[in-house]
Amino acid sequence: MAVHFSDASSCWKVILSDTVKNRGLLSEIERFARENTAPAKVVFGTSGWRGEMGTDYTFRNVRIVTDAIIEMLQSQDPAIMQAMGVADFAEIRKRGVIVGHDNRFLGPAFSREVIGLLQKAGIRTWYAGEAATPEFSAGIEMLHAACCVNLTPSHNPANYGGFKFNPSDGGPAGSEITTRIEELANRMMQGSAVPASVPPKEMEKVDLTDLYLTYLQERKTLDLKRIRDFVSREACMICIDHVHGATRGRVQKILGPSPKISYLRTVDDYLFGGVAPEPSESNMAGVEQALAGSNARLKLGVIMDPDGDRIRFSDGSIQIPMNYFGAMALHFLHVHKKFHGGAVKSAGTSNLVNAIAEKLGIPIRETRVGFKNFRPYLMRSSGERAIVAFEESDGISGYNHTLEKDAIFGLLLAIEMMAVTGRNLGAYLADLMDEFGYYYPDRSGISVDRSLVGEPLIRRLSVIPVQYTKGAALKTGEQVRTVTDIITVDGTKLVLDDGSWLMIRPSGTEPKVRFYIEARTEAGKKALCETAERMTREALSM
């Protein structure tokens, strides 16, 4: 008996309840995506606009966002042109736009909608097909393209679609661009003149993986020969879990075939086997099992998200999140590869990298969450260039590399670490902690009333840095600590006299307050989380 759904959300709920049994209902999602004419609120967060496919993310609304971008470019506003890195619209038409997608449902169909409208405006287009986010970033530079449209919601669940826009430097669009797109798109959403679908005249295809490989060879941040030689000669085992994402096939093309490298979850699956396709600790089970079954002395396992901009590591004995790997990358690139510059991180990341940077005399910069905030330090023209830039949510890039976070770069860098040090990542990390100190990060949060989302929540929490100033006493568990530093670039981060810290940050789009903490002992994490929650509830009650 056929089931009738009144909206895409209810259909998705059934699909995700049993992705094997109900995957046939994706045809219903396509119907909603094509027929639903309801407007959506377009917000470009830290990495693009995202929405539920068939509900917010529809063919109508993707065309509107594309049309908003075209109108923005045609306006030739000097501030927008400067942020885009172009002189005028004529230059954009000539240099062109790369369009592609990850492996999500309807990716090719949504791409055709975007390409058709761009071509109608006289803009040259390249179709990348399925590609990873860092490949778009490298491809823009290699093709000297004006920008790219990458249709991906990154690590979000299967019911989401997404829209990323990158200007000519290859990095995520800055707020001066995304704010204008939001303004235009949300105005168009309420109007009656919705752009009609325009079939592309032709699809000029481009292989971004080929361009990405050339990019790696030219930039020389990574020693590809040494990496390939290590895999070929050493008794090693490498396991890569692609979670059915767009990174599949990339490593084979870069490193060549090898029986020492195994690949997990590489087949087509729009529903990701029913899991949230993120590089989480729980999603590493397959990698851990594969590593446990190997007798190789040197082991490396990783998991990447669907668009290839996030990664998590393991050596079979310990999982290594980006909080730790970013610090290891700084040490490796500076000490072993002799790169000079600074360390750049989002404020919620581990202070292990701070300890390393301080001892090695490396300047460190902490920014708001969002890889776009690393742009001033990753550009080749930067006066203060980053040796490494990373955020706690598993994203990394490095010296002379892309302005986008790059999981493939993280994987290759990890292999080179093993090749140079002759050690597993866990042993390298233990050496660093013995030398620079032990740090134990964690994160948590609480939900708040939906009426507080946005400015009201920011206002309530603004009392925290007023109450807790430098020198103030703060009780955490049974101990009383002193506040030695306050960082307010992204919420409020209080650094304590033993090097531990807590950060309280309101979500900009959800009714939540997020806590990021770091203790100096494993046992101290609970007390810091409880302290952050207590401070938050006190602030909200005022």
Image: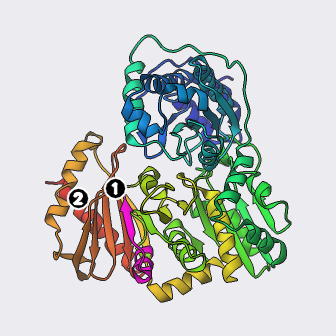
Work out which residue is located at the far top of the displayed protein and give it.
192
Give the distance between the C-alpha atoms of the residues marked 2 and 1, in whole angstroms: 9 Å
Task: Indicate left or right for 125 with 263 as reference.
Answer: left
Kindly indicate the quadrant of the structure image that contains residue 485.
bottom left
Packing grade of label 2 (10 A; few <14, some 14-19, many >=20) is some
Q: Amino acid at mark 1?
A: Ile
Label placed on residue 144 = none
Kindly indicate the quadrant of the structure image that contains residue 106.
top right
Packing grade of label 1 (10 A; few <14, some 14-19, many >=20) is few
At a point 24% along the width and 47% down the height, the residue shown is 457
436 and 148: which is toward the camera:
148
- The image shows residue 490 at horizontal and vertical percentages of 32, 56
Work out which residue is located at the far bottom of the displayed protein and give it.
434
500 and 418: which is toward the camera:
418
Q: Which residue is mark 1?
A: 446
Of the image marks 2 and 1, the number of the one nearer the N terminus: 1
* Label 2 close to label 1 by CB (< 8 Å): yes
**Residue 37 visible to the viewer:** yes
**Which contiguous range is marked in magenta?**
353-367
Residue 129 falls within the magenta-colored stretch: no
35 and 208: which is toward the camera:
208
Q: How many marks?
A: 2
- The image shows residue 201 at horizontal and vertical percentages of 70, 18
At a point 55% along the width and 42% down the height, the residue shown is 153
Q: Which residue is mark 2?
A: 537
Kindly indicate the quadrant of the structure image that contains residue 542.
bottom left
Task: Indicate left or right for 236 with 375 as reference.
Answer: right
Q: Is residue 106 above or below residue 200?
A: below
Quadrant of the image containing the N terminus? top right
Q: Amino acid at mark 2?
A: Arg
Helix, strand or loop status at disc 2: helix
- The image shows residue 19 at horizontal and vertical percentages of 67, 41
